[in-house]
């Protein structure tokens, strides 16, 4: 029975990562001529890992809350900058559009009864 829980967790992880990748891809399409969707999924994964590492490091020294969220967001935007080779402004635009896109997709999924997903790789979504 434990493998069913693990299997479901893997599915939720994969779907949330694909949603995060889709959101980043949409943001990149609007902000500049983006590459493939697969690049956006990789960016979502790297951004999620970077954000998690920031959370772990800051929590280990007793820092959390708004400051940790701001640092995590800046690290996530820097991953977008690095992956797409753009400046801070364009990477931030991708972030804003990705966030709204993820909320839209998650809202649609909630309407059809799949409301417990997050958009892995998109902060706060």
Image (tube, helix red, strand yellow):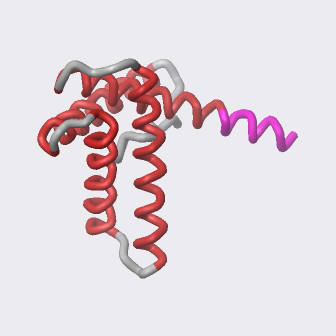
Numbered disc total: 0
Residue beneath the point at 49% across and 18% down: 112
- SS majority, magenta: helix
- Report the residue that reaches farthest toward the front: 85
Q: Residue 29 at what x, y percent from top left?
A: 24, 20
Question: Any magenta on residue 9?
Answer: yes
Near-viewer residue (33 or 67): 33
- Report the residue that reaches farthest toward the right: 1
Near-viewer residue (34 or 97): 34
Q: Residue 38 at what x, y percent from top left?
A: 45, 23
Q: Residue 70 at what x, y percent from top left?
A: 26, 60
- Report the residue that reaches farthest toward the left: 89
Please say whether residue 110 is visible from this viewpoint: no
Where are the magenta residues, as a range? 1-10
Residue beneath the point at 43% across and 81% down: 61
Residue beneath the point at 29% across and 36% down: 99
Q: Is residue 82 above or below residue 70?
A: above
Near-viewer residue (29 or 107): 29
Quarter assignment of residue 54: bottom left
Near-viewer residue (44 or 11): 44
Quadrant that contains the C terminus: top left
Q: Is residue 64 above or below residue 13?
A: below
Please state if 91 lies on the left or on the right of 110 as rendered.
left
Please say whether residue 22 is visible from this viewpoint: yes
Q: Is residue 6 above or below residue 40?
A: below
Residue beneath the point at 48% across and 67% down: 56
């Amino acid at each position: 029975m434990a493998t069913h829980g693990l299997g479901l967790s893997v599915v939720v992880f994969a779907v949330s990562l694909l949603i995060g990748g889709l959101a980043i891809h949409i943001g990149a399409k609007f902000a500049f001529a983006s590459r493939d969707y697969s690049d956006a999924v990789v960016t979502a994964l790297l951004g999620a890992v970077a954000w998690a590492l920031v959370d772990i490091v800051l929590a280990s020294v007793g820092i959390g809350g708004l400051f940790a969220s701001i640092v995590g967001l800046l690290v996530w935007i820097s991953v977008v900058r690095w992956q797409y080779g753009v400046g801070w402004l364009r990477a931030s635009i991708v972030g804003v559009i990705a966030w709204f896109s993820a909320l839209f997709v998650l809202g649609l999924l909630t309407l059809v009864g799949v409301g417990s997903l997050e958009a892995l790789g998109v902060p706060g979504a």
